[in-house]
Image (spheres, rainbow, N blue to C red):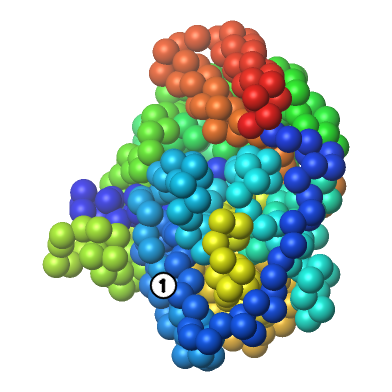
Amino acid sequence: MKRLVAILGAAALFAAACGGDSGGGSAASADCPVDALDNATTPVELVVWETFTGQPLRTMQQLAEEYNASQDKVVVRLENQGVGYEEIQRKFNTAIASGDLGGLVVLEDTQTQFMADSGTIVPAQACFDADPSANLDDFSETVRNFYSVGGALQPASSNLSTGVMYYNRDHLEEAGLDPDAPPQTLEELKEASIAIQAAGVTQQPFVMVLQPWFIEHWLTGAGVPIVNENNGREALATEATFDNATTLEVYNWLAEMNSLGLLNAVPGTEGQVDHYFAMALQQASITIETSTAISTINAVLEGTLDPAEVGLDADSLPAIDINVDVAPYPGVNAAGEVQAGGGAWYIPNTNSDEIIAAAWDFMTWFNSPATQANWMIGSTYNAWNDLAANEPNLQEWEATTRPGQWLSVAVEEINNLNPGFPGPLIGPYTETRTAIRQSLDQLLLAGQTPEQVVAEADAAITAALERYQQENF
């Protein structure tokens, strides 16, 4: 069973599935040499820095092979840079000084402002503007807004994901609850957990890894900013707004769930798998996680995942029979209150014009409706090209398969997001998430009060924003 849990935990590794002037700086001032491939006399090697694993890795390998076979100008080579977004970001930051960066780099959604201010990338807006065949209107408005700085799109593509709820249908039924009507709000989640515990199904029905992005989803979904300047969207954020009534409502809910013994709070360390362990052993009934985990969880349930794909030295998977289902993320006010997330594809500007053009050519192919549909089916990342929804193979997959039906939950959540409030834009996002993670640890593992930990996180975020502004990233 531990072998199984490690494989389920791989879903966490490819999810995570977390400065300058955001009002006008770092926009699309750079040129994008989209035609530079015309001058190449031999195939251009395009090295892609990534951290894919499991089903997404398998799918990306297949897509890279398909692209390489479709033309003779570019050869894509995937180059793994670690087990998660934090590791690849550290390697990217270290390599900035030397300029020895990949031709494409897939980083976490939190890095938008930093990447724009770093001066190390060609903003995708410049490439879209330079390529008459590219049409930004084909792509999700919410996602474009989420990844834009000063009105200019920064990454060339997105591996789109968001939060969903995974729950054990049998456990709800054993507790006298309707498994077709799972909890939709935090209050309903508490009531369901009380019923499950009272029925003796599980002692701690709700297991939650203490990841800060869950808090961001609850706040953004409720329309509440984490930082000033309209969540950093109107100008560079300079002050935290984290200490507010909604944040305190969420933290008081968490504290109550913990005090009632309904919550199994798992430390949010990198690569954490204990929440999967609790679900797999049926010690918990409900958890929240990234929608990207769908592909790996489904493969485990079907017994089709090769353990070697997620770095395990094992010959086979143990049998598992858990009646898991997926529902919208339980919100403060309603189901499906989330924000956009996932990974983003950046084009470093430290390479030759030919490599930059090769990166854009691959991204143009990758962003096409047909490829986006295949990527979505294979990886369970959402497509960010809206036209992919018209692809017959994707429509059939969503209608007839378990992962397709599960992912439709996340698709609907993304489609219902407010394009004007897609999520925060923060320069020191890593420091911000560290402050929120520490506040969760102090609340649920150290027993401090919601008021205390929220105030301390707010102060830490403001201090990080001030340093970022002073140092200009």
Q: Between residues 79 and 366, which one lies in front from this camera angle?
A: 79
Left or right: 339 as drawn, with respect to 197: right
Residue 37, quarter of picture: bottom right
Q: Residue at x 83, y 30 (%)?
A: 229
Residue 71: image location, x then y, percent: 53, 90
Left or right: 352 as drawn, with respect to 228: left
Left or right: 43 as drawn, with respect to 451: left
Q: Residue at x 31, y 73 (%)?
A: 304
| Vertical position of residue 295 compared to residue 378: above or below | above
Question: Which quadrant, please, contains the C terminus?
Answer: top right
Residue 24, quarter of picture: top right
Residue named by callout 1: 77
Q: Residue at x 69, y 74 (%)?
A: 34
The amino acid type found where label 1 is placed reads: Arg
Residue 63: image location, x then y, percent: 48, 79
Q: Residue at x 55, y 79 (%)?
A: 374
Q: Between residues 80 and 324, which one lies in front from this camera angle?
A: 80
Residue 407: image location, x then y, percent: 57, 64
Which type of secondary structure does the marked residue at label 1 adopt?
strand
The answer to whether residue 130 is visible is yes
Left or right: 200 as drawn, with respect to 425: left
Residue 198: image location, x then y, percent: 44, 32
| Vertical position of residue 135 compared to residue 262: above or below | below
